[in-house]
Image (cartoon, helix red, strand yellow):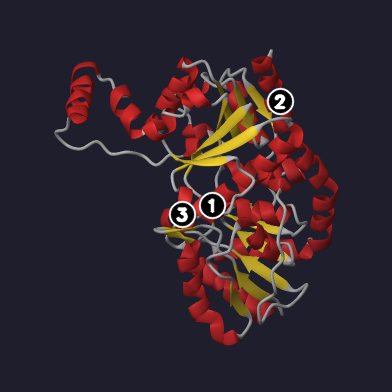
Amino acid sequence: MKIVMFAHGGSLNRGCEAIVRSSTNIIKDKIQNVKVYLASENPESDQQLDSLNGIFDASKQSITRYSYDWLISSLRVKLFNDETYALGIIENNIIKHINEMDVFLSIGGDNYCYGEQPGWYEVNRRVKVQGKKLVLWGCSIGEEDMSDRKLEDLKLFDLILARESLTYNMLLNKGLTNVKLCADPAFTMEREELELPEGWQEGNTVGLNFSPLVMKRNKDSKTAVTELITHILNNTNLSIALTPHVIQEGNSDYEILRHYYEIFKNTKRVILLPGNLNAIQYKGYISRMRFFIGARTHATIAAYSSFVPTMVLGYSVKSRGIAKDIFGEEKLVLRIDEVSDFSLLKQNFEQMINEEVAIKQQLKTNMPYIKGMSYKAVEHLQDLVETIEV
């Protein structure tokens, strides 16, 4: 049985790396005689993922202007409004492997949150044309993200695994019958503990992760986070560990966090973690924090799964749904438009401190269930695999 994970942009996004690492491990743990492959748009960034059986280059191909393919593509689009020929060339690095594989896992958990995805739609269509099984693995999709075209694509999947209940219920309400509820596989990911840096207070360090994505969508949030750091330094004895989790060019947490570090480094209580660690190493640091404040979902998952009280900065349905499934409410999750409001940041931070013991207890009580829901995804996948073997 050969399973390939695709729709993966590369492991410079440590959340994407966390999905690949944890998914590979839980699949191999529960399904016998399975080989797991990765189709990556940046395969060089994935070489450390040694539990995989192989990594394919799935980078997108360009169509040279005035070439034969360009002429055919242009004519088909102009005459028939048909993009399939062009998309087939652009996505050929994954399409050419369809015949070799049995099951295709689309693992970009929130790819469907960012507008239409015609390239993936075409890959999905061709997977089904060749009679292969197609799974949307651990997804989150908001009501606002849905379109008629997207809904038609979702109907192609043999199985959709929603990683939180907000997405699950929304998809059911759209009439889809191929949806099951699970949890993000990264809740099960292991950690690696490196030496603690100078300035780290054991048991008294708060992690802070911030992202260009949040700052781009709410420009005033940058100032509000500066005010939050100032508040923490002036009103607590905590050290602050600035924690990047995505280090892609043009989308690097490290660059933003380095800006904050330069402002506050003279306090001797602000640490900037390296920008070249892998997902399990970042989790190793996050797991030893007292509190965590994060914009990147998988950084917050690393904290939740390590029983670290966590405050989430301005994210979408995935963070809201994950918090709701853990706590029964969207606890300490700020909307994107709220992150620029320092009074709200301060209020949520102080709530996290005041409820520290209760939050840790909730995490310790509920995390076994959440991790069990991560494995539930593999159970549903196994049911699908068994239909192939029969």
Q: Is residue 335 left or right of residue 237?
A: left
> Which one is nearer the viewer's eye here, 353 or 3?
3
Q: Which residue in the rendered view is the most extreme toward the top?
A: 390
Q: Is the C-beta separation of discs 1 and 3 under 8 Å?
A: no
Amino acid found under the numbered disc labelled 2: Gln
Mark 2 or mark 3: which is in front?
2
Q: Position of residue 289 (x, y in %)?
A: 72, 67
Residue under the image location 51 percent in, 57 percent down: 246
Residue tagged by mark 2? 382
Residue under the image location 49 percent in, 35 percent down: 112
> Which one is nearer the viewer's eye here, 137 or 112?
137
Mark 2 is surrounded, within 10 Å at the Cα level, by few (under 14), some (14 to 19) or many (20 or more) other residues, namely: some
Amino acid found under the numbered disc labelled 3: Leu
Asked which secondary structure carries label 2, the reply is helix
Q: Can see residue 71? A: yes
- Compared with 209, 108 (above or below) is above
Asked which secondary structure carries label 1, the reply is loop
Marks counted in the figure total 3
- Compared with 247, 95 (above or below) is above
Residue tagged by mark 1? 47
Q: Position of residue 304 (x, y in %)?
A: 72, 53
Q: Can see residue 139? A: no
- Cα distance between the residues tagged 2 and 1: 27 Å
Q: Position of residue 297 (x, y in %)?
A: 60, 50
Q: Position of residue 167 (x, y in %)?
A: 61, 33
Q: Mark 2 or 3 closer to N-term? A: 3
> Which one is nearer the viewer's eye here, 242 or 102?
102
Mark 1 is surrounded, within 10 Å at the Cα level, by few (under 14), some (14 to 19) or many (20 or more) other residues, namely: few
Label for residue 282?
Answer: none
Q: Is residue 177 left or right of residue 31?
A: left
Residue tagged by mark 3? 213
